[in-house]
Image (cartoon, rainbow, N blue to C red):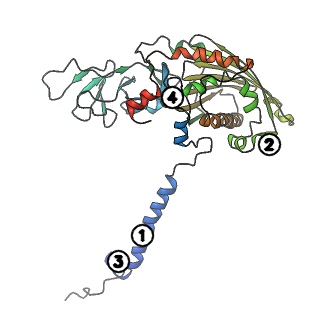
Amino acid sequence: MDVYRSSVLAPWTYAGIVSTNGSLVALAIVGVLLTLIVSALLFNRKPRRSPAEEVDERLRRRRYPKPTPPPFPNGWIPVMDSTELAVGQVKRLDVFGEDLVAFRTEDGVAHVLDAYCPHLGAHLGVMGRVVGDCIECPFHGWRFQGDTGACTHVPYASKVPDFVKIKKWTTDEILGLLFVWYHAESQPPSWHIGDVPEVASIDCSGSLWWRGENHISCHIQELAENAADVAHFDFLHGPSMLATGEHFFEQAEKTVYGSLLRHNWQTNWEPRDHTAQVKVVCRTSSPFRWMSRFNEYSFTVTQVGPALVVTTMRTAFGNIGYVLSLTPMKPFHVRAVHRYFPDRRMPRIVFWIIIWASKGMFQRDIFVWNHKSYMKSPALVKEDRTILAFRKWFAQFYSPNSPSWRDVRDKTLQW
């Protein structure tokens, strides 16, 4: 007779715990599940956007039924950070109204092709993989060479169909960014980013101290036009750098933060060939003596084509290289990526103060951009003459076949 066999299970065994304390175990399990669910909801919530970035989609659409420039200018368009594409990695891209796929082969070269396999239309950016110098379609294993877009392998065919190709997009990697050459007439690049002296002066070899990103609801031309709009500097950016866009939005410069300092701007914008430049001197008035070293700083801001801005900022504590890349994701939706490269000798506390101030200043512009309407024939005074000069300069980035926002809407059914 087994003396240990009993209808009552030993309480120290797993079965006994479940039997004698079943309700406690059930409660504990439920508690753990609830904790996991609540944690997932809390920590995976999207951060609340500031009013600067809150744009009603219907309002955005209503602002642009009137005549506007084509949404996608010709030129070098930044599509991603170079660090976002490792060797052997494949990324899908949805930019300037096109579905593309980016991948980096073993030789370290980044390639961009049209996204859809010409065989049966599979998206190469979804489960596609890098094989040698090609990207392999996940559907049937067809391979396409990164350099040419040509089909080089069909695993079940006796002969490779040499007539099959995918469109290959011309790319360039510079300033830690991957650029794609976009042209509505399919013309090859007429200029190169690396040939611009101001680009070469930006030292990206040091560590990237700060990267930020904004999504803005306006035409990409309007962001670039800001530099030529010299009158807006003193009015919008005159109140203290301590006042964020939130403060400016609520009470302008009447807040304590906005009244402590005052910035006076001197600007000189001039167009060139495919670049334009504005030289800026900012002088700050302050009641605090310790602020004297911050009283004056200067910028050389160079617009390189339609979608890149490089800035050298000079301060008493050292220089900062600032790269602003603008990607037209779809009509009137621009992704702005900010990357700052300070001198190694610059104290970090000074750099973070400058970043804080720059973010607040840029946020003021975002408030305006997100809610303004493009004016094809604006009411201007003679002091606004640089705006007309800018628009004449920027027109070089459009061509007869540049698509309108209606063309993009009809093609993609997404906007």
Mark 2, residue position: 254
The answer for how far apart the CA atoms under marks 4 and 3 are is 59 Å
The amino acid beneath tag 2 is Lys
Using the image, determine if residue 340 lies above or below residue 9. Answer: above
* Between marks 1 and 3 in the image, the one whose residue lies nearer the viewer: 1
Q: Is residue 19 left or right of residue 289?
A: left
- In the picture, the quarter occupied by the N terminus is bottom left
Q: Which residue is mark 4?
A: 327
- Along the polypeptide, which appears first: circle 4 or circle 3? 3
Going by the numbered disc 4, the residue's amino acid type is Thr
Q: Nearer the viewer, residue 4 or 95?
A: 95
Can you give x and y, in whole percent of width and height, for residue 280 in the image? 72, 21
Does residue 374 appear to the left or right of 29 in the view shown? right
Residue named by callout 1: 30
CA separation, marks 3 and 2?
66 Å
Cα distance between the residues tagged 1 and 4: 47 Å
Which numbered disc, 1 or 4, marks the residue closer to the eye?
A: 4
Nearer-the-camera pick, 95 or 405: 405
- Does residue 210 appear in the picture of this structure? yes
Other residues around mark 1 within 10 Å, as few (<14) / some (14–19) / many (≥20): few
Whole-percent x, y for residue 306 in the image: 54, 20
Q: Position of residue 129 (x, y in %)?
A: 31, 33
Q: Is residue 245 above or below residue 156?
A: below
Q: CA distance from mark 1 to mark 3?
A: 15 Å
Q: Quadrant of residue 90?
A: top left
- Toward the viewer: 40 or 77? 77
Secondary structure category for the residue under label 2: helix
Residue at disc 1, secondary structure: helix
